[in-house]
Image (cartoon, rainbow, N blue to C red):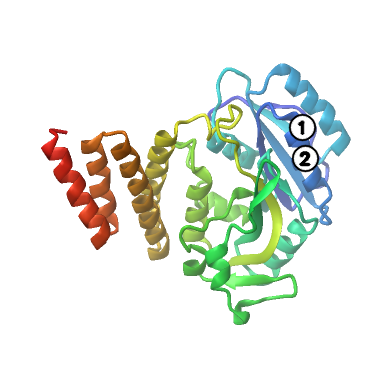
Amino acid sequence: MRCRTERVLTMNKEKPLVSVIVPTRNRVELLRGCLEGISVQDYSLFEVIIIDDGSDEDVITAYETMLEEFGERFKLFRSNLDSRRRMGPSVARNIGISHASGEIIAFCDDDDFWCSADLLSVAVDALGRNDAELYFSDQQILRDGQIVSKTSFKNVKARLTGAQLLNESQVYALTRKQILCFPDYAHLNVTVAQAALLERTLGFWEETRYAEDVDLFVRLCDRANGILFRDKVCSSHNAPQRNAQDSASQGVSQLNRRLLENSVYSHLAAVCRSKEARRYAALSLASSSKLISQQLEQQNQLSQAALFARLALGVRPGLKWGLYTLWLSSKAIFKGG
């Protein structure tokens, strides 16, 4: 592992079946809400690996005090002792995975929370009974405490069939094509995977600090033998507040976020093996490039806008966008861009 890791709490004597990875940085009360949602699970054979990415010393003290309330299954690791810098979510989560004892890995971000006490029990049962490697449940998305979306899988759910229903817990067996239904994707908070699958996919792509959840989602689906989906909201995702300084993703400008997304989609196009995963990557790359082009055009950066317009057109040809690309390219040439 590339960073020194300091262990804070002791291991549970009984080896857990499930390891829950929770990255955190300077979020005491938010982390408490996250851990409370995990602690009330009706499945008990789990551990929680909390990876701290450079919190201030007073926050570490508060974390240690808090974790005494939750018990020895909840373990804190300091993977970054420099509060001035972040390692980033990909590196932090990979360090968490390296400390995991479970055969099954689940995730929950420190500013989100599980809202269903049977998230783990249903996932473990479904994975075991159906010899599957990957499991998702649905989630709702909140902003400022208000629901802004009741599902993260609108397109996936529209394609479910009764023949795919496995049990009374609303668990379905999906094809790779169904789950990779652009633009739907699974946030980490509803992702449960066999550790062996994560090992085969090499975990998180550490070269990105943004859209790492989309990258992992597509690569897991690309390689998984058996994919399950539970049609029930089991987690609440708090969308980062705009301009929030404590969010790694919001500390980047809108244009730079789009550019980072493009690097992720290019990565997926390069490494994925299945046609379904590559198609998802291509659609994502085209959509993101269109947004970049339009933003640059609004900023009167015409030659740059035309470049991304041509990229989007090459990835996903279309008459309307082709005409826009031609107009934009001509405008850029005319103005000497």
In the image, what residue occupies the spot 82% across and 33% down? Answer: 67
Residue that numbered label 1 is attached to: 29
* Res 31 quadrant in image: top right
The answer, for residue 255, to whether it is visible in the render is yes
Label 1 Cα neighbours within 10 Å, binned few <14 / some 14-19 / many ≥20:
some
Instruction: Measure how far apart labels 1 and 2 are at the Cα level.
Output: 7 Å
Which residue matches tag 2?
Answer: 33
Identify which residue is drawn at 70% across, 36% down: 50
Residue 14, position in %: x, y? 82, 47
Q: Is residue 269 left or right of residue 76?
A: left
- The image shows residue 97, relative to residue 10, as above or below, that is below
Q: Position of residue 275 (x, y in %)?
A: 38, 64
User: For the N terminus, which image quadrant?
Assistant: top right
Residue at horizontal 54%, vertical 35%? 91
Relative to the observer, which residue lies in front, 334 or 16?
Answer: 334
Q: Cβ–Cβ below 8 Å for labels 1 and 2?
A: yes
Is any atom of residue 225 visible in this view?
Answer: no
| Mark 2, secondary structure of its residue | helix
Check disc 1 and give the amino acid type.
Answer: Glu
Position in image of residue 104 (x %, y %): 67, 54
Label 1 SS: helix
